Amino acid sequence: MSDYLPHTEEEVADMLAFLGLASLDDLFASVPPSLRLAGGLALPEGRPEPDVLDDLAGLAAANPASAGRLVCFAGGGAYDHEVPPVVRALAGRAEFVTSYTPYQPEVAQGVLQALFEFQTMAARLAGLPLANASLYDGASALVEGVNLGVAATGRGTVWVSSGIHPHWRAVLRTFAAGTGHQVVEAPLRLGQTAWPERTGSGSPGVIAVGYPNYLGCLEDLGEVRRLCDRHGAVMLVAADPVSAGILRTGGEWGAEVVVGEGQPLGTPLSFGGPYLGLFACAERHVRRLPGRLVGETVDAEGRRAYVTTLRAREQDIRREKATSNVCTNQTLMAVTAAIQLGWLGTAGLSEVALRCARGTRYCRDALLGLPGVSPLTGSTPVVREFALRTPVPARVLVDRLAAEGFLAGLVLADLTGEGGDGSVSAEEAEHGLLVAVTERRTRTQIDAFVTAFDKAVRQ
Amino acid sequence: MSDYLPHTEEEVADMLAFLGLASLDDLFASVPPSLRLAGGLALPEGRPEPDVLDDLAGLAAANPASAGRLVCFAGGGAYDHEVPPVVRALAGRAEFVTSYTPYQPEVAQGVLQALFEFQTMAARLAGLPLANASLYDGASALVEGVNLGVAATGRGTVWVSSGIHPHWRAVLRTFAAGTGHQVVEAPLRLGQTAWPERTGSGSPGVIAVGYPNYLGCLEDLGEVRRLCDRHGAVMLVAADPVSAGILRTGGEWGAEVVVGEGQPLGTPLSFGGPYLGLFACAERHVRRLPGRLVGETVDAEGRRAYVTTLRAREQDIRREKATSNVCTNQTLMAVTAAIQLGWLGTAGLSEVALRCARGTRYCRDALLGLPGVSPLTGSTPVVREFALRTPVPARVLVDRLAAEGFLAGLVLADLTGEGGDGSVSAEEAEHGLLVAVTERRTRTQIDAFVTAFDKAVRQ
Amino acid sequence: MSSPDDGARRAPLFAEDPGGGVAASAPLVGDAAEPTLFELSRPGRRSWQLRTTDVPAWGIDDLVPEAHRRTSPVPLAEVSERDLVGHFTRLSHRQFAVDLGAYPLGSCTMKYNPKVCDTVAALPGLADVHPGAPGWLTQGWLELLVRLEEALCEITGMAAATLQPAAGAAGELTGLLLMRAWHDAHGERRTRVVIPDSAHGTNPASVTLGGFEVTTVPSNERGCVDMEALRSVLDRDVAGIMLTNPNTLGLFEEEIEEMADAVHRAGGLLYYDGANLNAILGVVRPGDMGFDIVHLNLHKTFATPHGGGGPGAGPVAVSARLAEFLPGPRPVRLREDGAAEEDGAAEDGARVAAEARADRAGEARGGHARYGWAMPPRSIGRVHGWHGNALVLARALCYIEVNGGDGLRRVAERAVLNANWLRARLAGVYDIPFDRPCMHEVVLAASTLRKRSGVRAIDVAKRLLEEGFHSPTVYFPLIVDEALMIEPTETESLQTLEALARAMERIAGEAAGGEVGTAPRTTPVRRVDEARAARQLVATFDARR
Amino acid sequence: MSSPDDGARRAPLFAEDPGGGVAASAPLVGDAAEPTLFELSRPGRRSWQLRTTDVPAWGIDDLVPEAHRRTSPVPLAEVSERDLVGHFTRLSHRQFAVDLGAYPLGSCTMKYNPKVCDTVAALPGLADVHPGAPGWLTQGWLELLVRLEEALCEITGMAAATLQPAAGAAGELTGLLLMRAWHDAHGERRTRVVIPDSAHGTNPASVTLGGFEVTTVPSNERGCVDMEALRSVLDRDVAGIMLTNPNTLGLFEEEIEEMADAVHRAGGLLYYDGANLNAILGVVRPGDMGFDIVHLNLHKTFATPHGGGGPGAGPVAVSARLAEFLPGPRPVRLREDGAAEEDGAAEDGARVAAEARADRAGEARGGHARYGWAMPPRSIGRVHGWHGNALVLARALCYIEVNGGDGLRRVAERAVLNANWLRARLAGVYDIPFDRPCMHEVVLAASTLRKRSGVRAIDVAKRLLEEGFHSPTVYFPLIVDEALMIEPTETESLQTLEALARAMERIAGEAAGGEVGTAPRTTPVRRVDEARAARQLVATFDARR
Ligand SMILES: Cc1ncc(COP(=O)(O)O)c(C=O)c1O
Ligand SMILES: Cc1ncc(COP(=O)(O)O)c(C=O)c1O
């Protein structure tokens, strides 16, 4: 019998007596007998912690893809960045981990101030004046951004570049079934979005583009800005926060909404979650901002204090009229990001971005020298990651390289589906490999990877 | 250039200017030029944390003896006990880890109260009214206990059972060179101490015995008590805190000083340190108690508070007249032990002790069934661990079993030296293996161990 | 020797207060404010250290085309590791948390979360796995997810589930889109979803995002859905109803069977908001009550610490007939031939076929893959960028396996026992709007107190902070005047309950205006000016000046 | 609905205050005392969970002979994991620490300790290794220890070292026993050891335990050892002298060469107390100053957090002529033939031969063992139960390798820079008994202040706690009246120094009796009654009643 309950048998008896009840079952008198579960749950009996820990450690050991075992060249929205012990230690403080949403500011200044600092840094990364206290992940941030744009313009047509991560577009399509948005996915040509010539289903309320896009390409955001001006659409940029260390911000390009995946800011790969949805926008959209927002104010004695504000946007107050339904968000990852960005500082973030770009250049040049390997995105400039056309099916390559100790990258077909999508053709999807190189990859690792890659394509 | 210094170049300049100095070197003007180190230290340049971490992780990987890789049957004062995540988490709280000795009680109630609770539990384990706030390790606790006894009786002759851990006896001999104690080591016969018939070098001021002794044997402490009465000696027992869960306490046996190694109380194997020296004694020795002692008192408003007390015993006040020279001790391990004992509670400690005894019985019976394997301590009752005579040299056995995935135990010769000592003969030392079985060893592990052992002795 | 008489011959270096890491804000030593990281910042300071890579050190100009290149670095705080640690450690001392004390925040199930789950979530083989790695290299993760899904289905009495939703609200929206897909598949256009007036705010908000209109039904005097009112709104436009049972008043909807029957007869579906599942674990299952769709809040019932507001996980479980619509890809057991095992939803989709191929390819080295991914045939699509909040899911499985079926039932029993004990203990001290045995939480009210002495629920909440307890949820559910919603959870001891009760008794006895009105006074800050925060919005450090 | 008017119909369950996990003691929410774990205890409660082993469940009677069997279990606290966590987390909120703020405790070098060292100390391959495992299975640990020993020798300018001593005082005693062994080996019986009157208390205490008598030499008006006085006590009875340089006044003993010369000519040895090494890292080395024996406080200079009072590590390094006396066994590099490499001390002892044998045996599988253990031929023996505080040693190596030779020198420079800046900054505010540039710490005095306003050093110390700083060391060194010994360390920023200076200025300006006399008021407890603690000793919970 293993559990975490303080009640001694004697106390249970006393408490039941105090309630005038004969048994614990009597507590459930209001549950119709016909509904009560006879014989209990068909689950194994409880097991002591050490047994369960052994068991789960066994499952962990059954994941050869672990970055500790395969050198990671996979990206596509999830990156193997340095997370130093100091960040893990601080983000692991029990006060941050075991508190609820800061509903009582008098005893929640720790989380509130950390979020205020996070919002400041997130806004600076986006080049916009406002950022919220987090959303679930990059995909949900995209959805919320689109909803904001549609609400702001009153137009439900949404132009989305196929350069935005296929999974994010998939999530957008899923939720569009509820909101009824018309999602028009503009195809990529050599890694650049080919925007619609004319407005078929009405002119767009939102135009969304990735920066860099999911194939690592830098698109012409000036053109997107012009399109938005022409159509009076809200410009939404899905930007990578680390690349922001070397790239112009969405804000500088004229975006009104910048969303992104915050995982690269201190969160481990975590098999995809919990991650961090980044959301920043222009002043004029503040009342449509989804999710929580922390603001500075003063307490009864005039001391600086923080509190969640503009709550009137939120579901618990506005209910069906809320700007979003989000309640629980990813606060702990936001706090972690604040700590990680505090650790990196001005110089550190640029340095990480620069090192990623260097590794990407170094690795890409070498791989493009291998027989039958060519770029999928022509000569479009790339940072952060790059897509290759491989002579053998990418899936086979990944498999062969895993045996050599490398997670070679992502198979495009795994992202787009076998048939490909607006970003790549079916054939490109099958022979497309997305490779990412972070600041953690050494020249030695990259050289070994290239050698193994060479062997794998010839094999 | 990697370091942890906050100073910017500009600030260094400002500060030097404020001091009216031209360079950092000027700070060391009082160091005779002839002595200054020219060219700096002949050490490698600093390296970034990740590089060093990789390097040290490499060293860690070069320890196949890791309990994570070889199933641990080694004991001899260091045991592979369960340390649950909750204990690690609490003992790792930065406030406990990064504070100094509690010199300012107003801001050190956390450590002080934890130590007060530790002292209470340590005293109860020993069956004595007083325990201090820790010493370095079991060996140093033995030395301090002997010093206390000699000071109390004014007699420098010390009878020490050879059943006390050979390393502890070695440490005692080392320090006796300074204190001038006459240490008489009484030999073991079949795991029982054979005390001197007559007092050669004057009657003993202290008689020290292990319980269980280092070969796992339960000695007749009643006899020791009688000897102490006869000689007016202080009875000192070196007891294992976990076995205390099933054994009578030293206090019950009439000991005035009980010392022990606290590693089994929440501290990992740690290659031998930092461990925890346990020290408990009778009221009448309180003014001779070595090390720190926390006492309860009240603050200016009458609130319960804790403070280090009877400081007059300590070196920083009494200087050459201090009862001991100990200053920094093992507080963090003491706090850890308090947490671990809080986790175990009354029932948990007994359960652990009982499970160790069961595993010991189960494993010992099976091993004694193997060809050429016999007990080194006859039929003397054992708990916690046991010594075997092995047909092949123990060192060879350990080597063979390591290849099978087991740390088979400790080679007696590694503890006593090749020649053996009062506890075992040279031949027993070479063919003697000390095996410990903790509550973490499963029947499956033990059965596999026995099978491998069988193979190893036949090989 | 120099003595003060020499007088200070040098002017201090700083004009105004220098900031820079003074610990004065550690509550341990007073209540001074903690400067922001930006105020601690000094240009040129650093904490970061990165691995030596020996990759050619091209400059930014060689790597980024001018048009895209940023001209100056992103301005961030520049602090030493020492100040970084001081700052966030001090902030942590300004934060209440479950680990510091009781947190009876109604509807939030702030139970103690075992530390073993932290260890699980930190296991290298789980925490450092890339979500895009092929199935044959992540069999451990896939098995973990499948095992969790199966356990959750057993606990809820449903047939299949998706683990993708990142929180409860995401689960709700997912569930509503499943409703929509179901009706579409049956050629129906239903426009309304019914929710009781006691529902949590996320319910109506999700309904809107699901493309439906909200129809609210009132609660009756027993605190349950008014059957008559419900029947009167049920028609062919109703896609379904969202309920949480026990409801937000902590009361079990006794007529749930009749409701299910009525809704189903009207062709609607029943959605179960699992936020309150803690009350009925192993006692009664949503599926057995007739629900078609269920979301769970793993961060409530299944012991994921709440992280100051997240992350959580909101898996959605459904009955067999809805399984084929579930989001995907879903983790599934694979048959020998590499196809997914049937469970109503996991027919071979493109993904699983593909995976299976990859897995066979991998078998040579990876061995036969026993788990893979499958896209349900009529899936509504993805609702998460990857597979959901995986590490939260791992915690939940650990918690479920340690407790086991038996332990989970004990959890519910003790949770309900604690709430009822507190209810009885405080009867006569606060109003009890619905005077019936409750489930895992009890809703009290300060209405009489307010009439008598002017003390409001919010005052009680703030005073409790001084007493060492986190406040209950106040003014929710909306249908209760001066509501104090208390959920003690099963991990608080009887002694803690009694201490809480005494504190609440004391407070009820205090005169208005005085103590109560001005509380809290011992917290790092006093009551904060929320109006000002909204009026003069300062949401970033840059908006300060 | 039930309203308070019904009156409380049930009596509360508890007579007196129940205790039991109320969080009232979290400083965050007030300053109420935290109950002891024993007061939180309730019979039958538990936290522990142990692995299922399936070992036969013999009863205690089958396993322990009656005479030895305990009749009732050891009474310990019985609490739930939830209360265990609440209790110790709340206690942690009642504890100041470096991670919370500046800790200028003179002589203790309370610098910030990088978190990376915690990660190193927790590496499974280091933390879970049994100390008795054979050398060929612990080559990683052996290499680590050898690398550290070599680095420490380079840093101190010595030939060989032992890593066994668990703390500084243990290092001192080890060093004194080395002195004794040396003189014995030279057929001399020397009885006295000289120490300056400014020495730390452990020095005289260790001298006594080393079997010597203490001869104290006074400091001169410059705060250094008075050479004349020293010469006058040097004779054939003097075994040696113990010094720390810079001394406890934070001043460098300028005449160290002359002293070394004088002591050596008298046939004595020089012992260096390394507690203050932080001041001279990479600048000047004890070996070059003429010291024969040096102990280091890794928990001061080499960034092991102090753990509330320990653990530390006090390695002892010696010049070549003393190496053969070092404690053992020592970790050593092995030659191809399995013998230890010469370094003056590591001649083949029984142990290394034995190890080498085992290692050769192990080679088949373990590969050639490059490291082993060696017992110095004339070793004084063991001074630790195993190999010393190994995990502390691992932290130190990590710290040394990250900083490197260059970084260590910067450490000393910044430490000395900070101390001198503070000294200059506070000149004119407090007395500066020895008005010379200092090294890593500065000793101020409150004598004038006391004369002027009656404010004593202890008052200043207590008031600083309210200002968010830990107090300096007070009333030490003993030779300074009203001493305030301040060691800022190199990890505190200029801004923190200025904030500290301002706080000290404020305090110096405050009237006696008032604020200062009653401080601290914002801490979890006020000044405590130390006399009562000693008078009515209550050292355990059982001694309370
Ligand atoms: C009754 C109820 N439903 C839904 C939710 C929403 O869950 P989440 O916050 O995880 O989105 C909550 C939690 O606040 C709740 O209490
Ligand atoms: C000058 C000096 N010498 C010796 C010591 C003793 O070191 P430890 O406390 O590690 O035994 C200290 C530390 O307090 C010290 O400051």
Image (cartoon, coloured by chain):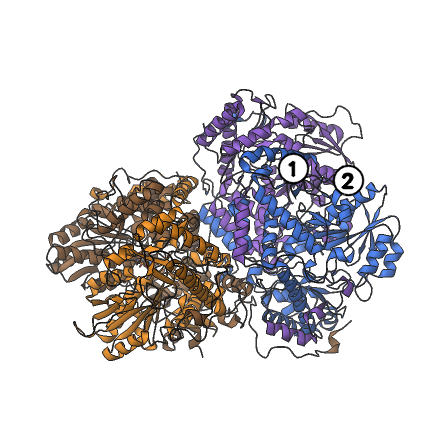
Chain colours: A purple, B orange, C blue, D brown
Which residue corresponds to mark 2?
A: A177
Q: Quadrant of the N terminus of chain A?
A: bottom right
What distance separates the C-alpha of mark 2 from that of mark 1? 35 Å
In the rendered view, would you say B9 is above or below C6?
above
Q: Tag 2, which chain?
A: A
- From the viewer's side, name the closer residue of C197 and B392: B392
In the image, C437 versus C411, the foreground residue is C411
> Horizontal placement of C493 versus A323: left or right?
left
User: D287 or D420: nearer the eye?
Assistant: D287
Local secondary structure at mark 2: helix
Secondary structure found at label 1: loop
In this rendering, does residue A183 appear at all? yes
Amino acid beneath label 1:
Asp
In the picture provided, is A111 more to the left or to the right than D440?
Answer: right
Residue tagged by mark 1?
C337
Instruction: Give the percent coordinates (x, y) of residue D269.
Output: 17, 54
B438 sits left or right of D408 in the view: right
